[in-house]
Image (spheres, helix red, strand yellow):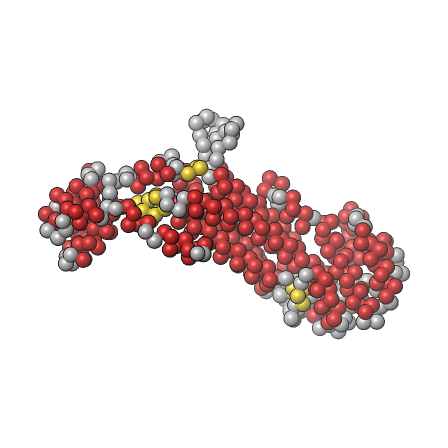
Amino acid sequence: MIPRYSRPEMVAIWSPETRFRIWFEIEAHACDAQAALGVIPKANAEAVWRAKDVTFDTARIDAIEAVTKHDVIAFLTHLAEHVGADEARFVHQGMTSSDVLDTALNVQLTRAADILLAGLDRVLAALKARAHEHKDTVRIGRSHGIHAEPTTMGLTFARFYAEMDRNRRRLLAAREEVATGAISGAVGTFANIDPAVEAHVCAMMGLTPEPISTQVIPRDRHAMFFATLGVIASGIENIAIEIRHMQRTEVLEAEEFFSPGQKGSSAMPHKRNPVLSENLTGLARLVRMAVVPALENVALWHERDISHSSVERAIGPDATITLDFALHRLAGLVEKLVIYPETMLKNLNKFKGLVMSQRVLLALTQAGVSREDAYRLVQRCAMKVWEAGADFQTELLADPEVTAALTPAGIAEKFDLGYHTRHVDTIFARVFGA
């Protein structure tokens, strides 16, 4: 991923240096297990660990690969240059390249998941804080972009919190799903390596043994992982879209923090644009771009092919780096989001009580009017508000069919704003706990 949308901690997981370090640890732990089984001399296993403080020369490995056309062999050749040819002769004993590549990839994915979980925690903390801050800040709820009924800004934040909390649980499950390793040899039969080696390597690398592999770890695990990243990205976009709508000039119920010296447009000095939210929408598309290739990686020929390999070399770093950046950008956006309660109230009252139409409808049915007639009466008064800018309560009071069923006091009571917020505490308890 380009540096503009990258954070160093996540980038480091995907660096060649980190990859070769993981490869080395897999090979070294495998040698330890082989020595414990008496398959190779203990001295040779100990000799491999001489390279534990080595910074592997990526340029040298690339040069060897240019000849061998095989990345794992190139690495093993370079490792032998540090360990000694005779001492390293038992490295990779009974293993195949995928034992190293797949196990290492899953180590990287689990480490990436841990960073993403930390990013989600920051987003959740920001959403929770803003939800409680604006628990009772009334705003108009909208359906189809049109005024519906009152809600609160706190409920908006709480809704996003609940979604991101579900996403956190999904990522935990996806991390567990992908945290497997395989050291099972060619076609996965353990013919030339004892299953105890796999168990030891996995334990040392923080993984669990893959119950049954071919020559590769099954890719449905990875498909689930990347699909989860796509769902999280869509959750980020869901929040970003709401902020973009709230920042529209005609709405302006909230806006991104506009820092001193910031410029909104090269042409129009007055502009304050929702650039962070728009950027998050774009980043979400990039993360979701990895999902379909990951799904298509599930189907491989027989016990192994490498059609998945080139895909994962790209989507592994790109999807995790992009999502990591997006999570922290979203957290900062929410933490500093500027809220305008007065504008929210002004927008709610823009159509002079029209948003209370359902309460009047229900009151008429409770008073004995059929639902069809009640709907007709309320809609008749409502259309005058839409079309002529009338006051809804005034129109109701002037309608003889309405007042035949409801008293003026009964009509006025239906315009109590508190009616719509009386269960906010109940919803908050459901989302955040008692």
Q: Give the residue displayed 52% in from the left and 27% down from the top.
A: 261
Q: Quadrant of the C terminus?
A: bottom left
What residue appears at the point 39 percent right and 37 percent down from the top-left corner?
340
Observer able to see residue 303: no
> For residue 73, which quarter of the picture?
bottom right
- Residue 258 appears left or right of 17: left
Q: Is residue 108 left or right of residue 75?
A: left
The mark total stands at: 0
For the N terminus, the quadrant is top right
Q: Could you say which is closer to the camera, residue 179 or residue 291?
A: 179
The residue depicted at 62 percent of the width and 65 percent of the height is 218
Q: Position of residue 324 (x, y in %)?
A: 58, 48
The answer to which image quadrant residue 368 occupies is bottom left
Q: Is residue 423 visible?
A: yes
| Left or right of residue 371: residue 185 | right
User: Which of the 4 image quarters holds residue 34?
Assistant: bottom right
Image coordinates for residue 99, horizontal then vertical, percent: 72, 63
- The relative height of residue 101 versus residue 253 in the rendered view (above or below) is below
Up the image or down, 42 lies above or below 63; here it is below
Q: Is residue 168 left or right of residue 206?
A: left
Q: Does 123 sit above or below residue 184?
A: above
For image coordinates 37% across by 43% down, the residue present is: 137
Residue 41 locus on image (x, y percent): 87, 67
Question: Where residue 250 sits: x, y (%)?
Answer: 35, 36
Which residue of the protein is positioned furthest toward the right in this rendering?
86
